[in-house]
Image (spheres, rainbow, N blue to C red):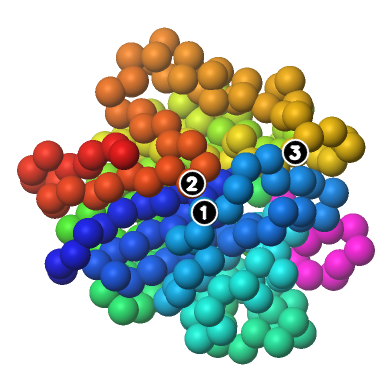
Amino acid sequence: MTGADEITWVGHATVLFDIGGYRVITDPALTRRVAHLRRRCPVPDRAVADVDLVLLSHTHMDHLHLPSLHRVRPTAHIITPDGSAPLLRAAGLSDITEVVVGDRIHRGPLTIEVVPAAHSPGRGPHSRINAQPVGYVVDTGTRRLYFAGDTDLFPAMEDLAAIDVALLPIWGWGSTIGNGHLDPGRATEASRLIRPQLVVPMHWGTYAPEDGRRRRPPWFDDPIESFQSEFGAAGELERLRIVEPGGVLLLGPPPDDEPLERL
């Protein structure tokens, strides 16, 4: 495979993989508002350019966001958890593959492995949609990239073999989080179980509930500061790559050489 391979953390759980020009976006949240949440940072232009594949981890509105999906190229193929396709088709989207844990999908130059996630399966109190959340391992042929979606710890994390880059959620969108999420401490434990070469924290520093003010809430940066502290206490800082929303992680030569360079 040739070309510059890179990861852009768009914000929240939205990640753009550009693997030799084949572009994959996860859980696109690309609008200024998502329900009662307001985005506190801009959407990078590259995130709404043409993509080839969409990976959806679960049906919660800040992960399966229909207005954002309509901003993605109409010919992009969508991979989504089993049970969620009716919601997508009702919104006029048609090129869809439903998946369950254990599935392996080949698209373009990539193999997509569907892996577990520990998170609530419903869309919300006003929807009958029920689809078991999943995560994905994107295998490029030279490295393996783990997108956790939204999850808590689960035992099978130890079985995620040979992960080069793990994109781990460390928070949510409010001042507190409930069950089914990783916080900085549990995300550090997840990294210990998975043992990736590098960890990129996500699901922080993007959206917050609307409060009528332009300023960021006082708790907004607490998750990443706590995660960095937890990671440091575990002696793992050399594996941590903190990328701000819109930031890019350039993938260098295959992992046998110097693997990654942070931009």
Q: Amino acid at mark 3?
A: Ala
* Element marked by disc 2: loop
Which quarter of the figure is the N terminus placed in?
bottom left
Q: Is residue 121 magenta?
A: yes
- Observer able to see residue 40: yes
Q: CA distance from mark 1 to mark 3?
A: 18 Å
- In this view, the residue in front, 205 or 232, is 205
Callout 1–callout 2 Cβ contact below 8 Å:
yes
Q: Secondary structure at mark 1?
A: loop
The circle drawn on residue 13 is none
Q: Which residue occupies 89% across, 37% down?
A: 212
Residue at mark 2 = 246
Answer left or right for 5 relative to 60: left
Seen in the picture, residue 101 relative to 223 is either above or below; the reply is below
Say which mark, if any, is on residue 208.
3
Boundaries of the magenta span = 120-131
Q: Which mark is residue 44?
A: 1
Residue 165, above or below 14: above
Q: Earlier in the sequence, mark 2 or mark 3?
A: 3
Residue sitting at x 90%, y 58%: 125
**195 sits left or right of 142 in the view:** right
Q: Is residue 78 above or below residue 259?
A: below
The one of 228 and 8 positioned closer to us in this rendering: 8
